[in-house]
Amino acid sequence: MEKIGFQHPELQEGEAYADHIFPSSFERVGWKTKRLGVVAYDKLTGKPLPENLNRRPLFVQRAEMIAVGVNPDINIDLIIKAILDAHGN
């Protein structure tokens, strides 16, 4: 699958950028291979999120995601944006 959209600069080999989260919720994330990054970016624009939002990037090994049936190449934010754009929103 061709990769489109934002490529997080902290992404390491074999990882997927899962989402951005509150650091306090990191321990509740169920992925075994999770890793908390430093700077959260808007997944559509690629711009850093304001620090006052207190978000950090969450990374997960692609193999773990695939093993449970999650496609790490699908960016739901881009899909939603495309739907909204198609409907003039």
Image (cartoon, rainbow, N blue to C red):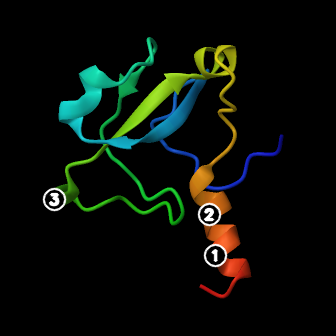
Instruction: Tell me the kind of residue under disc 1.
Output: Leu
Residue at 69% in and 69% down: 82
| Quarter where residue 67 is shown | top right
- Residue extending furthest bottom? 88
* Residue behind mark 2: 80
**Where does residue 77 sit, x and y in percent of width and height?**
57, 57
Q: Distance from label 1 to label 2 (Cα)?
A: 6 Å
Which mark is on residue 84? 1
Bin the neighbour count of mark 1 within 10 Å (Cα to Cα): few under 14, some 14-19, many 20 and up: few
Pointer 1 and pointer 3: residues touching (CB < 8 Å)?
no
Pointer 1 and pointer 2: residues touching (CB < 8 Å)?
yes
Decide which of tag 2 and tag 3 comes sooner along the chain: 3
Nearer to the camera, 46 or 67: 67
Residue at 64% in and 17% down: 68
* Residue behind mark 3: 52
Q: Secondary structure at mark 1?
A: helix
Which mark is on residue 27? none
Residue at 40% in and 19% down: 30
Q: Distance from label 1 to label 3 (Cα)?
A: 27 Å
Residue 87 versus residue 44 in the image, above or below:
below
Q: Secondary structure at mark 2?
A: helix
Question: Which quadrant: the C terminus?
Answer: bottom right
Decide which of tag 1 and tag 3 comes sooner along the chain: 3
**Where does residue 47 sit, x and y in percent of width and height?**
42, 63
Q: Secondary structure at mark 3?
A: helix
Instruction: Tell me the kind of residue under disc 3.
Output: Asn
Residue at 65% in and 33% down: 72
| Quarter where residue 37 is shown | top left
Mark 1 vs mark 3: give the one in front: 1
